[in-house]
Amino acid sequence: MKTALLNVRDVISGYSGNSVHAPVSFSLEKGDVHLLSGLNGSGKTTLLKTLAGLMPALGGLVLLNGKDIAGMSSTARAGHLSVMFTSRIGGLGMTVEELFEVTMHGLVNRVSGESMEECIREFDLQRLRHKSLLRLSDGEYQRVMFARAIAQGSPLILLDEPTAHLDYKAREEFCSHIQRLTAARRHAFVIATHDRTIDLMGERTELL
Amino acid sequence: MHIRLILWILLLILVLLELALGSVHLTVSEVLDVLLGKSDSAVNCDIVLQSRLPRILTAIASGAALSLSGLLIQTLFRNPLAGPSILGVTSGAALGTALVIMAGGTLIPHSLFLLGTSAGAILGGLMILAIVMWFSSRGGSDAVVLIFGMMTSLICGALVDIIIQQAHNQDLRSYVQWGFGSFGQTGYAGNVMLWITLVISLYVVISKARSMDALLTGEMYAASMGVNVKSTRMWVVCAGGILAALVTACCGPVAFIGLVTPYLTRALMKSSLHRKITFPAMLIGANSALLCDLLSRMFAVPLNTVASLLGVPVVIGILFNQKNLNH
C-alpha cells in the first residue's frame, strides 16, 4: 500500500490540554489541496501548527510519509513541509532577498531545486527584492511569504489565511500558482481560510 | 567593501591618537619608536606599554564584545532596541561583581580576584538574561519586554545600593569608580581573558550564523526551516550574556555601545544577515569605545558619561525612525 504524503488521524490540537475542536482526520497526496475552515477561534492556526510539528498534538497521530512527526528532528520536518503564518515578521529589517537566502541555503535538502532567481521571477517579486520586510504592505508581505513557503522546496505546504490581505488580482494569481503547482504533482497544500473565492479547489474540513 | 576599509582606517587613527594623547603628549614618531623597540626613553616606554597600550587593547576588545553581545541579544529578542544594558544584563553582572567585591573580597586571594569578579558578573548577567527570556516567552509586546528588562535592571541597582551601604570606605570608593566605567583598569591579564572570550564567541557566531539568521524570522519559522531552535538560542544566550558580563567585570557597566552599534551596522551594511554584519558591528563597536575613551580622557569626564551623551541622541534618532522598528 502506498503511504500518503500527509496522514492525519484523529488529531486534536490545543494549548495546555484545552482543545477547541473535534478530532480531525484526512490524508493528502502530492497534487492535492485540503482546506480547513471554521469561525474565528475555531482552532485553525493551532491545528496547522500541530500538523507542522511545531506543537505537540493533544491526541491522534500526524504521519509524514508514514512516519510520526513527533519523532522527527526539525531538519527532517523542514525537508517535508513548509509553513506560512498570519502574524507578521520583521526580521530586524531583513530584505526580501535575504529572507529567500535564509530559506533556501544550507538548512534543508530541497526536493525541488529551483534557484532563488527562478523563484523571485516566478512569483514576480523583482520589484520587492531589496525592500525590507518591515516596509512591505500587508498584501506584498503575504505574496512574499507564500513564495517563501514554496521556495523552501518541501512537498507539503501549510498556509494560514494566505489571501486575507490580497487584492482581487493577487488573489487570482495566488489561485493560479496553486493550480500550476498541484498540476505538476510536486506539492500538496493544506490551507486554513475563510476566503470563499478559493473554495473550488479541494476537499474541506470544517472545524467544529 | 569600502565601508570596512573606512572603519579600519578610523580604528588606526583612533589608536594612534590614543597612544599619543594624554597627560603626557607624545609625537607619533615617539610612539612608533617605542612600539618598534627603538626608544631610549624609559618614561615613554612605560607610558605607552604599561598604560596606554593595555587600555587601547581593552577598549577595542570591550567595544567589539559589547557590540557582538548587543547583536546577539537583538537577534534573540528580535528587537532593535534590546541590548545588554537595557535588558538588565549589565546590572545583573554589576550585582554579581559587587557581591564578589564586597562579600567575597576578603575570602578570595588577590591573584584570583579578577577571575572571581568575572565569574560573579557572568553568573549575575546570565541569570538576569534567563529571567528576561522567561518573561518574554510568556508573550507580550517588545515594549513590555524592554520595560521588564529595565525593571530588573533597577532591582539589581537597588540590591547593589544595599550591598554598598555595608561596605568599607575604600571598597565603596573603588566600587563607585568602577561604576563610572573605565578601560584603564584591566591590565594584561584581564585583556587576555577578554580577547580569548571574544575570539571564542566570534567563532560561535560565525559557525551558527545561518541558524541565527533564521532565528530573526521568529522561532516558529526558524523551526519550520530546519533550525534546532533550542540549541541555537542557548548558544546565543551564552555568548551574548558572557561577553557583556565580562566587559562589565573588567570595565564597569558601560552603556549604549551594545545597544546602538548593531542598529547602526544594519543601516550601514543594508543587511540583517549575521554573516555580513557581525564583523563590521565589532569594528564599529571598537571604534566607538576608542572614541568614548579618547573624549573621556581629553575632557576628564567618566567613560559612561561620554557614552550616554553620544548614545542617547542615536537612540532618539532610532525612535524617530520608527518604520525601521519591529512589528
Image (cartoon, rainbow, N blue to C red):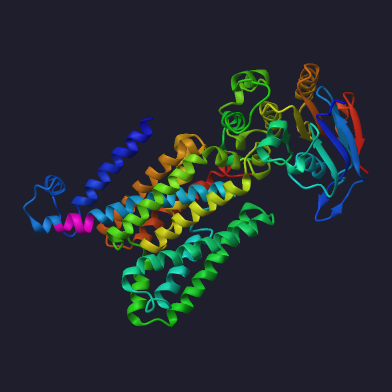
Between residues B31 and B231, which one lies in front from this camera angle? B231
Residue B217: x and y, percent?
A: 62, 40
Quarter location, residue B219: top right
Residue A172: x and y, percent?
A: 79, 21
Q: Residue at x 11, y 46 (%)?
A: B33
Total count of labels = 0
Residue B81 visible in the displayed image: no
> Horizontally, is B26 left or right of B76 in the view?
left
Quadrant showing the N terminus of chain B:
top left
Q: Residue at x 82, y 32 (%)?
A: A6
Residue B131 visible in the displayed image: yes
> Horizontally, is B31 left or right of A35 in the view?
left
Magenta span of residues: B46-52
Residue A33: x and y, percent?
A: 84, 27
Between residues A172 and A81, which one lies in front from this camera angle? A81
Quarter location, residue B213: top right
Dominant SS of magenta comes to helix
Residue B160: x and y, percent?
A: 47, 73
Between residues B19 and B215, which one lies in front from this camera angle? B215
> Horizontally, is A161 left or right of A127 in the view?
right
Quadrant showing the C terminus of chain B:
top right
On whether residue B252 falls in the magenta region, the answer is no
Q: Looking at the picture, does residue B96 appear above or below residue B21? A: below
Q: Residue at x 46, y 38 (%)?
A: B277
